[in-house]
Amino acid sequence: AQSVTQPDIHITVSEGASLELRCNYSYGATPYLFWYVQSPGQGLQLLLKYFSGDTLVQGIKGFEAEFKRSQSSFNLRKPSVHWSDAAEYFCAVGLSNSGYALNFGKGTSLLVTP
Amino acid sequence: DTEVTQTPKHLVMGMTNKKSLKCEQHMGHRAMYWYKQKAKKPPELMFVYSYEKLSINESVPSRFSPECPNSSLLNLHLHALQPEDSALYLCASSQEDRAREPQHFGDGTRLSIL
């Protein structure tokens, strides 16, 4: 069955430090991959998406993600974290050749310390 | 600011009340979704409308009744809810009901059942 795993429930980084959030997927073909961010009390905002082509994808707010087929991973990165990046981050996979479903990971909660 | 607008932002209701949640988008999207999100959990899909027709009902109890009056509007009618239905209800839309289409989320309605 298709699934998405975010191994880290919580991550704490210092402001200005680099960030990497991990996402692994289980799927036979190349999936459609997304990263969303959710600030407290708000909905989900799309950071970036991957369908095909270049494996390094640029998103909004200075985020990027790299698709690695050999590792079934789609990790999110940011070179320098700002306090406003503190939020919940969800990796999601859309099932190709199928409608409707976004399969979300359980999320990673990011805390940014001064 | 999100392009998917949900009202009200907060709703408190008793178990015998009838209320409705509303969602509106003007991006010309033809697929709209209702999700339920409990605290510290990813969103769970409830319903999908594609071209104003209900295409997916994820075994949601009948006390939740969706309605899509036109391509821009999506309602969720609530009746005889239970305390465990307290959650954040998110609406989303996408260009079409396809896995490769990113979904755009509203900020949600925070629902509390007394």
Image (spheres, coloured by chain):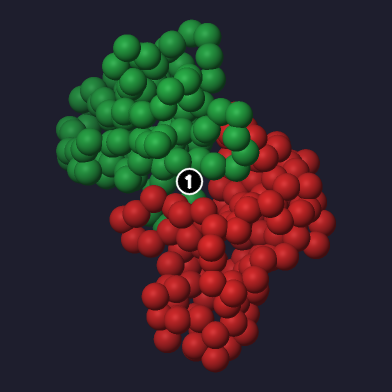
Pick whichever, B10 or A103, lies toward us.
Answer: A103
Q: Residue at x 49, y 51 (%)?
A: A43
For disc 1, the marked residue is A44
Vertical side of B101 occupied by B64: above or below: below
Percent coordinates x, y for residue B99 in the rendering: 58, 34
Q: Residue at x 59, y 82 (%)?
A: B79
Percent coordinates x, y for residue B4 in the rendering: 64, 50
Task: Look at chain B in the picture and name its colour.
Answer: red
Q: Image quarter for residue B19?
A: bottom right
Q: Residue at x 37, y 14 (%)?
A: A69
How packed is label 1: few (under 14 Cα within 10 Å), some, or many (20 or more)?
many
Q: Quadrant of the C terminus of chain A?
A: top left
Q: Which chain is in green here?
A: A
Vertical side of A73 occupied by B26: above or below: below
Task: Indicate the amino acid at tag 1.
Answer: Leu
Chain of the residue displaying label 1: A
Please tell me whether mark 1 sits on a helix, a strand or a loop: strand
Residue A48 in view (yes/no): no
